[in-house]
Image (cartoon, coloured by chain):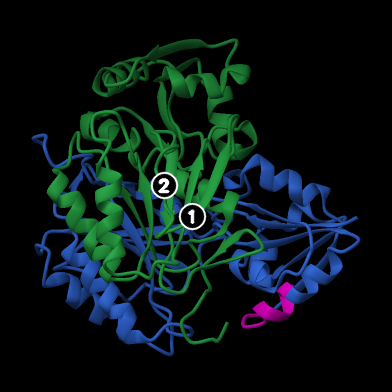
Chain colours: A blue, B green
């Protein structure tokens, strides 16, 4: 009898995968995934059958992985955590009676946060700016509620060619509720090859270098920069 | 010259630590942490000096770890991700010129989500119900804004002896905005010894088994249960 592991491989650097994720991949006969993510783990899957497909083929990939898992050990991989904008949901939606195990991973907001300091120390939220499956009005409403609630905000999929102005519009919403000196971090390729970071404030923010491999983190009303580190204090009741 | 690793060890089970976290711990001369979390990694630190302290001694622990890191390799550990309600923020607040590296981990909401299915597939937030350093009114406001924004909500520190009624009051706020059949998961000791899960709806929710080792996840308006799995679909534009 086969099995399907739904594996979050973390940000991409092999050391930032969980031990369990690595074991699942090693145990698998077949690895299924989007080709960009397959590349991250190339060095540990050289003896495996690999089925990689391009962007937008998520459903085909999931159907195939489920089918193969009836009598093989299969891993379908997502970057970050498979359960956060990854493959876990679609696999479970399509699942009939296959044996599925979800293996969590370090999602992009956590990876990006660790690179710039400790911005997510308090209540925080993840919002994707992709409108492929969510109306833009709902995305903007969420940014507004998150701002009102003083959540630290991590923006996934912050900018793509088809919607270059969304990020700026969402930052304008946040500016209505937060001071101009609120820290903003742009982290590109966190904890993998090509990593780069920029630290701004809401006032100085520029989105020139932001792309689909970036995460943008906006601090709450207590966040500040110290010695280059982006810090949100743990509480609202202690003095800085 | 020494170094301080701020290590998120993930949910507790050794396999759910990142490879980097394990390497940092192995490389360290000294391990510092809250004794409950030290227990999780006991088997891999038997040759190390261990400094474990009780609850509420966070600042002392951080000061000590920073001091020791001037000429030793030290790991200060948090469960989950050190940057989410963990030690990373306080370390950076107290840091003078010590060499600090933050290593991310699988935070409780991700670990708990993976155990019950794929509840966090869409925009989501983490809210701690602990009022030790946050006024309860602000916590309730956040629950209200998160509800209005249709975020999936993960509640950390959901219930303690000093504030047994907060969880129920917060669920009542959420009920004003979400249908009675919205799925609610209680996951205790996710991915470590003693793991248990309960799946409710907002209507049937009971907090009898909830404690400080639990995470409570409340779905958004699209979440549903299928074959025992808690699923939030990826988008709002496709039909189920």
**Which residue is at 25% across, 43% downward?**
B166
Residue found at the very far front of the displayed protein: B204
**Contact, mark 1 vs mark 2 (Cβ under 8 Å):** yes
Q: Residues within 10 Å of mark 1 (few under 14, many from 20)?
A: some
Judging depth in this view, the residue of A36 and B39 nearest the camera is B39
Reply above or below: A77 against A62: above
Judging depth in this view, the residue of B10 and B170 nearest the camera is B170
Left or right, A166 with reference to B105 = left
- Which quarter of the rendered picture does the N terminus of chain A lie within? bottom right
- Which quarter of the rendered picture does the C terminus of chain A lie within? top left
Q: Could you say whether the residue bearing mark 2 is in a helix, strand or loop?
A: loop
The picture quadrant where one finds residue B215 is top left
**Which residue is at 42% across, 74% downward?**
A211
The picture places residue B191, in percent across and down from the top left corner, at 59, 39
The picture places residue B192, in percent across and down from the top left corner, at 59, 33
Letter of the chain that mark 2 sits on in the rendering: B
Which of the two discs, 1 and 2, labels the residue nearer the N terminus?
A: 1
**Which residue is at 33% across, 60% downward?**
A125
State the mark number for residue B206. Answer: 2
Q: Which residues are magenta?
A: A54-62
- Res. A223 visible in picture: no
Kindly indicate whether the residues beneath marks 1 and 2 are on one polypeptide chain.
Answer: yes
The picture quadrant where one finds residue A174 is bottom left
In magenta stretch: residue A29: no
Q: Which residue is mark 1?
A: B200
The picture places residue A202, in percent across and down from the top left corner, at 17, 66
Letter of the chain that mark 1 sits on in the rendering: B
Judging depth in this view, the residue of A124 and B231 nearest the camera is B231
């Amino acid at each position: 009898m086969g099995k399907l592991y739904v594996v979050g491989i973390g940000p991409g650097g092999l050391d930032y995968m969980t031990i369990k994720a690595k074991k699942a991949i090693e145990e698998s006969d077949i690895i299924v995934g989007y080709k960009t993510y397959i590349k991250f783990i190339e060095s540990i899957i050289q003896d495996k059958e690999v089925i990689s497909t391009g962007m937008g083929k998520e459903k085909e990939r999931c159907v195939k992985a489920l089918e193969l898992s009836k009598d093989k050990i299969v891993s379908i991989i997502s970057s970050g955590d498979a359960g956060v904008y990854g493959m876990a949901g679609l696999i479970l939606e399509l699942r009939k009676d296959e044996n599925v195990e979800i293996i969590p991973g370090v999602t992009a907001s956590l990876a990006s946060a660790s690179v710039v300091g400790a911005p997510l120390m308090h209540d925080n939220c993840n919002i994707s700016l992709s409108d492929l499956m969510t109306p833009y009005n709902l995305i903007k409403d969420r940014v507004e509620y998150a701002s009102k609630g003083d959540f630290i905000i991590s923006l996934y999929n912050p900018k793509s060619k088809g919607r270059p102005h969304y990020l700026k519009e969402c930052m304008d919403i946040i500016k209505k509720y937060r001071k101009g000196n609120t820290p903003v971090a742009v982290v590109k390729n966190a904890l993998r090859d090509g990593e780069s970071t920029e630290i701004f404030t809401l006032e100085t923010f520029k989105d020139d270098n932001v792309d689909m491999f970036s995460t943008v983190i906006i601090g709450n009303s207590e966040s500040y920069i110290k010695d280059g580190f982006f810090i949100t204090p743990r509480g609202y009741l202690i003095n800085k």
